[in-house]
Image (cartoon, rainbow, N blue to C red):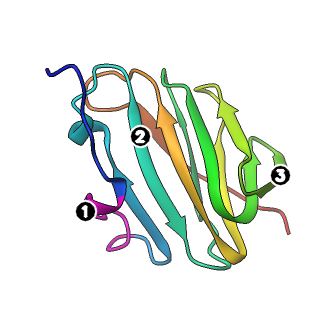
């Protein structure tokens, strides 16, 4: 492994939009060659709401909103998001996002994870 890596997240292939309409996702972990960090870019089209949530068995995450607005569901609580908000989540917190009328763009930052990942997908109810 080299001592540094420079990667443009927008030049990494979008591996999400072909599977999930309205959501673009570019995962940088393998491109960075990092032992400890995962950094990814996500864009939700205006009004797009995640139909499933997820949590992790071991990996802590933080999301940094870089453009737009929306809402995040954290376990049973819904919180408004705006540009430059940072949300830190312990592994066990179930999380899901919804874009506002101007869309939502954020950077997801993850810590160490076990081989093969540790994300657990779950159905969620937004309750509205």
- Toward which corner of the image does residue 5 lie, by quadrant? top left
In the rendered image, residue 43, in percent from the top left (x then y), is placed at 51, 66
Please report the residue visible at 76 percent of the width from the left and 59 percent of the height from the top: 71
Compare marks 2 and 3 and give the one earlier in the sequence.
Answer: 2
Compare marks 1 and 3 and give the one earlier in the sequence.
Answer: 1
Q: CA distance from mark 2 to mark 3?
A: 24 Å
Nearer to the camera, 3 or 12:
3
Pointer 1: what residue? 13
Q: Are marks 1 and 3 in contact (CB under 8 Å)?
A: no
- Toward which corner of the image does residue 126 lie, by quadrant? bottom right
Nearer to the camera, 92 or 45:
45
Q: Is residue 82 magenta?
A: no
Residue at the far left: name it: 1
The stretch in magenta equals 10-19
Pointer 3: what residue? 78
For the C terminus, give its image quadrant.
bottom right
Please report the residue visible at 15 percent of the width from the left and 22 percent of the height from the top: 2
In the rendered image, residue 66, in percent from the top left (x then y), is placed at 61, 56
Instruction: Report helix, strand or loop for mark 3.
Output: strand
| Rendered position, 40 above or below 36 | below
| Rendered position, 50 above or below 101 | above
Please rate how many residues cluster around mark 3, counting C-alpha atoms within 10 Å: few if below 14, some from 14 to 19, many from 20. some
Predominant SS along the magenta part: loop
Pointer 2: what residue? 39
Q: CA distance from mark 1 to mark 3?
A: 31 Å
């Amino acid at each position: 492994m080299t001592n540094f890596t420079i990667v443009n997240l927008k030049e990494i292939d979008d591996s999400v939009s072909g599977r999930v309409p309205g959501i673009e996702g570019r995962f940088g972990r393998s491109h960075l060659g990092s032992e400890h960090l995962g950094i990814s870019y996500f864009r939700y089209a205006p009004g797009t709401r995640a139909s499933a949530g997820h949590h992790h068995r071991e990996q802590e995450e933080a999301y940094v909103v870089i453009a737009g607005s929306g809402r995040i569901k954290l376990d049973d609580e819904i919180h408004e998001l705006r540009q430059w908000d940072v949300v830190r989540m312990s592994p066990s917190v179930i999380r899901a996002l919804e874009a506002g009328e101007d869309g939502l763009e954020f950077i997801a930052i993850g810590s160490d994870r076990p081989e093969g990942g540790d994300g657990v997908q779950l159905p969620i109810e937004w309750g509205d």
